[in-house]
């Protein structure tokens, strides 16, 4: 494990567990244990009240090699499509071009799923819709007349997404607020983005069950799912801000741009949780059944 607890020094106060951002420390009977969801952040050490810390570095470190992680996820889950990665920044990282044409966030993700996209720095000024504000990079801005023309044409009314302007913003209240407005976000294939903030990829119900079983295996934590609002709202804020994975059905436009099949939904994971997920994928009933050929 990246971090371990020395039982002889521990006073069982629970400070490490209650402050772990990955919720990787659990209590079993009278003792605390660091699970495979540990990401090496070291937050727990700062909250241990003992002069001689009861928690310290273990013999191994978390492996965040993005190429290895992408390969492991694809192999263990039998993924048929690519994995998109998102990394927030206030300016384009060296070697990453800015998106230079008007585009949708969900369409760029769809390119990554299809294996036809390269890393690009996506900003509000090239966003085709208001989704840029829903993923924390602000809004391109439009005149009031142009805004309402688009909304009335594609969003509100019979045969569209919402009955009226009164219900349109209601779903946003279920999601956390961004702590800041970022300059943009790098979106690209996981294999080409080192230490992204979150990753997302299409899955089916069976793959979701495999993932959720592995995620809850050590800690009992669950994965929440969403439906009923925009794809960007359902898949980005919670993993980025709350450090929790989510899955989402997506809305009509998001599903179309991401080119999802009828059987597919999207799962979004904080990257710091993924190495632990991969370890646990080999420990659940699904892995044992596969090994036994059942």
Image (tube, helix red, strand yellow):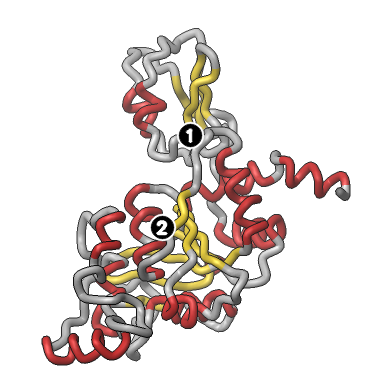
The residue where tag 2 is placed is: 197
Q: Which tag, 1 or 2, sits closer to the chain's start?
A: 1
Q: Quadrant of the N terminus?
A: top right
Q: Give me the residue at 19% from left, 70% from top.
A: 166
Q: Quadrant of residue 203?
A: bottom right
Question: Can you say whether 67 is above or below 261 in the image?
Answer: above
Distance, label 1 to label 2, CA atoms, is 18 Å
Q: Give me the residue at 88% from left, 49% from top.
A: 293
Q: Nearer the viewer, residue 282 or 42?
A: 282
Q: Position of residue 232 (x, y in %)?
A: 37, 68
Question: Can you say whether 172 is above or below 130 in the image?
Answer: above
Question: Can you say whether 240 is above or below 22 in the image?
Answer: below
Q: Give me the residue at 64% from left, 43% from top.
A: 279
The residue where tag 1 is placed is: 24
Q: Nearer the viewer, residue 40 or 165?
A: 165
Q: Give me the residue at 54% from left, 50% from top.
A: 274
Res. 194 in view: no
Q: Nearer the viewer, residue 9 or 175?
A: 175
In the image, which disc is placed on residue 269?
none
């Amino acid at each position: 494990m990246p971090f371990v607890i020395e039982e002889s020094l521990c006073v069982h106060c629970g400070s490490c567990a209650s402050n772990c951002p990955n919720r990787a420390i659990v209590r079993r009977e009278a003792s605390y244990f660091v699970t495979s969801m540990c990401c090496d952040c070291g937050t727990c050490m700062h909250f241990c009240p003992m002069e001689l810390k009861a928690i310290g570095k273990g013999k191994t470190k978390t492996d965040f090699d993005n190429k290895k992680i992408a390969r492991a996820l694809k192999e263990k889950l039998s993924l048929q499509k690519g994995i998109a990665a998102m990394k927030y920044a206030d300016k384009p990282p060296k070697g990453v071009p800015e998106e230079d044409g008007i585009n949708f966030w969900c369409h760029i993700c769809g390119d990554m799923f299809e294996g036809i996209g390269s890393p690009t720095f996506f900003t509000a000024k090239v966003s085709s819709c208001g989704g840029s504000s829903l993923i924390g990079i602000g809004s391109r801005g439009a005149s009031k007349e142009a805004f309402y023309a688009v909304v009335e044409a594609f969003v509100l009314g019979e045969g569209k997404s919402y009955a009226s302007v009164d219900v349109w913003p209601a779903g946003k209240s279920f999601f956390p607020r961004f702590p800041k407005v970022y300059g943009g976000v790098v979106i690209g294939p996981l294999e080409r983005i080192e230490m992204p903030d979150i990753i997302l990829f299409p899955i089916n119900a069976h793959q979701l069950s495999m993932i959720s079983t592995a995620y809850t295996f050590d800690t009992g934590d669950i994965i929440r799912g969403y439906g009923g609002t925009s794809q960007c709202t359902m898949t980005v804020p919670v993993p980025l801000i709350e450090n929790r994975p989510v899955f989402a059905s997506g809305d009509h436009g998001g599903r179309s741009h991401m080119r999802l099949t009828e059987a597919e939904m999207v799962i979004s994971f904080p990257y710091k949780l993924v190495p632990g997920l991969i370890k646990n994928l080999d420990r659940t009933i699904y892995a044992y059944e596969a090994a036994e050929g059942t």
